[in-house]
Amino acid sequence: MLDSTHLRRIAVIVGSNRRDSINRKLAQALVRLGAGKFDASFARIDDLPMYNQDNEGNLPPEVVRFKNELVRADGVLIVTPEHDRSMGKNSRTGKPAFITGTSPGAIGSALAQQHLRSVMTGLGMILLGGEAYVT
Ligand SMILES: Cc1cc2nc3c(=O)[nH]c(=O)nc-3n(C[C@H](O)[C@H](O)[C@H](O)COP(=O)(O)O)c2cc1C
């Protein structure tokens, strides 16, 4: 059973790197409200590189730091902005787009494609019909 006594250490991730981010301010206010109930630490994300499987054996120090911050935490609070109804900056509205992908597994990146489909719909992209999951 989870209760607040098990959630002492909260890693806070702010989904905006903007200097005057209102999401960072919201996160800081939430941390102030939680004073005495939990200990919060802000996990920095602005220096994280894009995921690259080649690095798995020798992770960049920023990634090691970030992972350790999450390992040490009992819980995570994510405070996210919304950009173009989604999580990223949009230069793609109205572009026709097709998604495909491959993986050694049986479903050939189907779930990642499903996530991406919903993000792209929010961006106003014209999703072409058909699906292609390559195993
Ligand atoms: C390119 C761009 C797209 C945005 N799209 C949305 C949106 O879809 N929904 C929304 O509520 N606010 C949107 N906003 C307003 C942001 O919520 C606002 O800029 C906010 O301050 C961003 O969060 P931050 O201050 O933590 O960086 C958008 C802002 C920009 C610059």
Image (cartoon, rainbow, N blue to C red):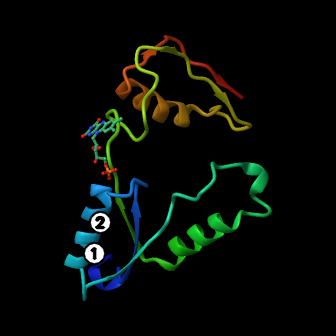
Q: Quadrant of the C terminus?
A: top right
| Quadrant location, ligand no. 1 | top left
99 left or right, relative to 27: right
Mark 2 is surrounded, within 10 Å at the Cα level, by few (under 14), some (14 to 19) or many (20 or more) other residues, namely many
- Say which of 42 and 18 sits in front: 18
Residue type at tag 2? Ala
Q: Which element is circle 2 on? A: helix
Residue at (31, 83) in percent of width and height: 38
17 left or right, relative to 29: right
**Mark 2 near mark 1, Cβ–Cβ under 8 Å?**
yes
Residue at (32, 57) in percent of width and height: 20
**Percent position (x, y) of residue 19?**
38, 58
Residue at the bottom extreme? 36
Kindly tell me whether mark 1's CB lies below 8 Å from ligand 1. no
Numbered tag placed on residue 27 in the rendering = 2
Quick check: 81 above or below 31? above
Residue type at tag 1? Val
**Percent position (x, y) of residue 118?**
40, 30
- Say which of 74 and 105 sits in front: 74
Which image quarter: residue 42? bottom left
User: Disc 1 marks which residue?
Assistant: 31
Numbered tag placed on residue 76 in the rendering = none
Which image quarter: residue 77? bottom left
